[in-house]
Amino acid sequence: MNEQLDDVLDREHLTIASLRARSAAFAIDEILISILLFIVLWDSITAAKTTEAIIGLTNHFLLEFMAIKIVYQTFFTMQYGATLGKIAMKIRVIEVKTLSNPSFFSAFNRAVFRIVSEALLYLGFVWALLDPYRRSWHDFTAKTMVVDA
């Protein structure tokens, strides 16, 4: 454990967000982004006649889907300290040094490494189970943590 970080959390009366709240926020965000992509691709989806065509369509728009996720995560984390899912779960992201909303670069870094964690079988998220402060890989790289709002 990091005694300096423990002191800051105690002094500022901050509580580390639970894994349950973080998981629920993750699910909410994924559903919202998926619905958005589904709406955008509705015409193409309805035009696809076979399962293979739908799979091909999904694969074709994978990079766009990742880009949407990065923009969504970066904007909301930088602007509000939380995505819509985190706002609903009453948790927020803070920079460890400043205890405020992450800067653009921290939020962007966090969003990109979140995608990397997902691509690597969600191992970055599993890491949070082992960390006493429940930080995942994207929290480590961006020097952030998720606390109760």
Image (spheres, rainbow, N blue to C red):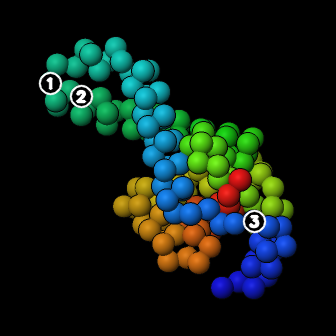
Identify the residue position indicated by label 2 in the image: 54
Residue 82 location (% of width, % of height): 66, 46
Identify the residue position indicated by label 1 in the image: 50
Residue 9 location (% of width, % of height): 77, 72
Which of the 4 image quarters holds residue 44?
Answer: top left
**Mark 3 residue type:** Leu
Which of the 4 image quarters holds residue 2?
Answer: bottom right
Q: Are marks 3 and 2 in contact (CB under 8 Å)?
A: no
Quadrant of the image containing the N terminus = bottom right
Name the residue rendered at 39%, 25% in the picture: 38
Residue 97 location (% of width, % of height): 81, 67
Cα gap from disc 1 to disc 2, whole angstroms: 7 Å
Q: Are marks 1 and 2 in contact (CB under 8 Å)?
A: yes
**Element class at badge 3:** loop
**Element class at badge 1:** loop
**Element class at badge 2:** helix
**Mark 1 residue type:** Thr
Name the residue rendered at 42%, 21% in the picture: 39
